[in-house]
Amino acid sequence: MEKIMVQGTEVLIEGQGPQTVVCIHGWPDTHHLWDRTVSVLKDQHRCVRFTLPGFESPPQGSSLSTNDLTARLLAIVHAVSPGKPVTLLLHDWGCVFGYELAARHPERVARIVAVDIGDARSPEFLKSLSAKQKLMLVFYQVWLAKCWVLGRFVNARFANFWTRLMARKMRCPAPPDSIHWTMNYPYAMTWLGVGGGLRSLADFKPHCPMLYLYGQRKPFMFHSQQWLDRLNATPGSKTQGFQAGHWVMLDKPRSLWRWYGSGLEASRDPTSVLGFTMILIAVRAYSTWATGRFHANFGSNAALRPAARLAKACFHTCVLH
């Protein structure tokens, strides 16, 4: 495992492969959320993980803004993959900040695999919630925002206690000792405008192939039906629900890892949005052509020679790239 420092953030790099997968966690987690995932992916992918800025220690000086967080993520991407766009593997608040990175710097993101947070800031999402669900959402988020203020300005011990209490009520899988009031920073941004708030977030519309995975065993979703419909209608993108909670990668690890693989392999670069079907067609066609069966089946028909060349090109683009 390789460790580097990027603007004060420790970045862990593990695995081998042509693609770099940047994993971004959410609340109330650290880079350890991805440990099991990385253990599965690292044989074929170069995996990068880190703890989000603001989550690992009490803030020093002025609060981080959305611009600051995006700049830090961009610096990490530049450091780990300077010459090639990366795949983003996101969960919870990692989706929010990862989407912002992709919206501001689309040239640095080749594909996105997002877990459980979709268009959670859209009017369609808010309309999809019942009054009870809206109250539940506001209650836990404002609670955590106030815990951040309590820890920053009053007493960190009490802030940790109330934060861990909410995490326990929400059945968060992170060890209680690893949960701290500093992790509530995004909620303070949302409800109290800390660090300038989230008003500057871009309107995220995926520019690249995207796989969206979500748990269905929750009091409410973090996406609208319109979000699912738009993604499913987008070539190269797909959505999939699981009988799991918010931490799908821990509730359904084996199922999710299979979908991770499809999301990471279905499109190897932005110019190759052909998916598994085209890859299989290309492999079969080129194999036939290469062994001579192509000519045995079709003779010397000149009209079919471009098809052979296309099959060969597809094979090299999709499989050997």
Image (cartoon, rainbow, N blue to C red):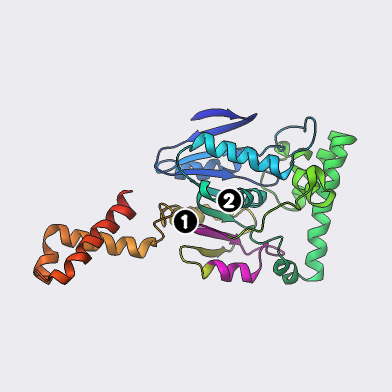
Residue 244, horizontal then vertical, whole percent: 60, 60
Q: Residue at x 33, y 55 (%)?
A: 318
- Label 1: element kind: helix
- Segment colored magenta: 206-231
Q: Residue furthest right?
A: 154
Judged left or right of residue 128, residue 156 is: right
Q: Residues within 10 Å of mark 1 (few under 14, many from 20)?
A: many
Q: Any magenta on residue 213?
A: yes
Q: Where is 158 relative to 134, above or below?
A: above
Residues at badges 1 and 2 in contact (C-beta under 8 Å)?
A: no
The image position of residue 32, as x and y in percent, is 60, 39
Above or below — where is 250 with respect to 46? below
Q: Which residue is mark 1?
A: 263
Residue tagged 2: 102
**Residue 267 appears in which quarter of the rendering?**
bottom left
Is residue 175 visible to the viewer in this orientation of the structure? no
Q: Amino acid at mark 1?
A: Gly
Category of crowding for the residue at label 2, using alpha-carbon neighbours closer than 10 angstroms: few (below 14), some (14–19), many (at least 20): many
